[in-house]
Image (cartoon, rainbow, N blue to C red):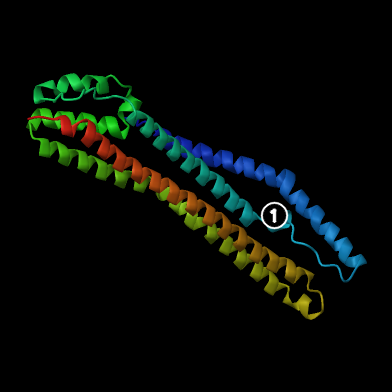
């Protein structure tokens, strides 16, 4: 039987492809030509003025392949976290809807649960997959079958805990990107140092241009990778905090709007 490909997986693949296309296009059309022009200009200045001290150029700092790969991963991580943030926002919008219309002083009996379940069941499949509708529907079903308010509270807590674990596991790819980014930077460091050692004989003869350029590759790749990793990790922690707060708010919402109005 043919299985449907998850929509989120398709989004991840296409967001990676788009990130590669955009970043590579920027590098080919802007970054590497700009770095080449800067290096040529600096070479002419050095030849004409021995006391000239070249300034660090952003084009030169980010021009190598390791930095390009780091920026691709950064854009990919941003797109993944943006999708998660949008999903969290939709969850909060769903929480603002009156899914269980219970007035003041009105209690919900086990016989009334089917009636209160209908507004939730009338939602679309996508809306029913959100946390609050799932928790409310499961709580109403459990109250109808057990007539025990404590069982309902336990069910709500269990679903919220499993949701926390699920949201945490879905961020594994972003954590991998945050780990892989400095690793790619260190690969650039190893490559640059290796090239510098391979040109050590030229430095002994007095030509240190190749060695300094290779060492620049080593240090620039590490600098860019660590900077990107710091930004990605900061946004990741902010996203994780908002998701955890969402689950806590959803549990409190269900307790206030449903559990406190149940009467066995």
Report whether 190 appears left or right of 129: right
Within 10 Å of disc 1 (Cα), the crowding (few <14, some 14-19, many 20+) is many
Occupied quadrant, residue 166: top left
Q: Is residue 207 above or below residue 123?
A: below
- Observer-nearest residue: 44 or 140? 140
Report whether 180 appears left or right of 47: left
Report whether 252 appears left or right of 172: left
How many numbered dots are placed on residues in this image?
Answer: 1
Q: Quadrant of the C terminus?
A: top left
Counting from the top left corner in percent of width and height, residue 253 is at 27, 35
Counting from the top left corner in percent of width and height, residue 138 is at 20, 32
Q: Image point 9% across, 22% down: which residue?
A: 111
Q: Image point 55% across, 49% down: which residue?
A: 74
* Residue for badge 1: 63
Counting from the top left corner in percent of width and height, residue 97 is at 33, 25
Q: Quadrant of the N terminus?
A: top left
Occupied quadrant, residue 107: top left
Mark 1: which secondary structure?
loop
Q: Is residue 262 above or below residue 124?
A: below
**Residue furthest to the right:** 48
**Residue furthest to the bottom:** 204
Q: Image point 16% across, 39% down: which residue?
A: 153
Q: Image point 35% across, 44% down: which residue?
A: 245
Counting from the top left corner in percent of width and height, residue 22 is at 63, 40
């Amino acid at each position: 039987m043919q299985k449907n490909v998850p929509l989120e997986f398709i989004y991840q693949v296409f967001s990676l492809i788009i990130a590669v296309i955009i970043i590579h296009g920027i590098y080919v059309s802007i970054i590497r030509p700009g770095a080449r022009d800067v290096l040529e200009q600096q070479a002419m200045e050095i030849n004409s003025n021995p006391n000239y001290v070249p300034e660090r150029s952003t084009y030169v700092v980010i021009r190598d392949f390791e930095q390009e790969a780091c920026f691709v991963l950064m854009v990919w991580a941003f797109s993944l976290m943006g999708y998660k943030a949008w999903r969290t926002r939709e969850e909060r919008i769903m929480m603002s809807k009156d899914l269980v219309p219970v007035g003041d002083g009105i209690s919900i009996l086990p016989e009334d649960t089917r009636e209160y379940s209908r507004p939730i069941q009338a939602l679309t499949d996508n809306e029913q997959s959100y946390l609050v509708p799932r928790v409310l529907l499961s709580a109403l079903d459990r109250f109808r079958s057990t007539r025990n308010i404590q069982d309902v509270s336990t069910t709500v807590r269990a679903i919220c805990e499993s949701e926390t674990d699920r949201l945490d596991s879905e961020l594994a790819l972003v954590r991998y990107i945050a780990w892989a980014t400095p690793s790619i930077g260190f690969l650039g460091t190893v490559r640059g140092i290796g090239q510098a050692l391979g040109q050590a004989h030229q430095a002994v003869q007095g030509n240190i241009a190749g060695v300094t350029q290779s060492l620049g590759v080593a240090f620039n790749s590490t600098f860019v990778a660590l900077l990107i990793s710091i930004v990605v990790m900061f946004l990741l922690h902010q996203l994780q905090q908002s998701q955890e707060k969402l689950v806590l708010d959803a549990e409190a919402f269900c307790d206030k709007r449903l559990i406190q109005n149940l009467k066995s």
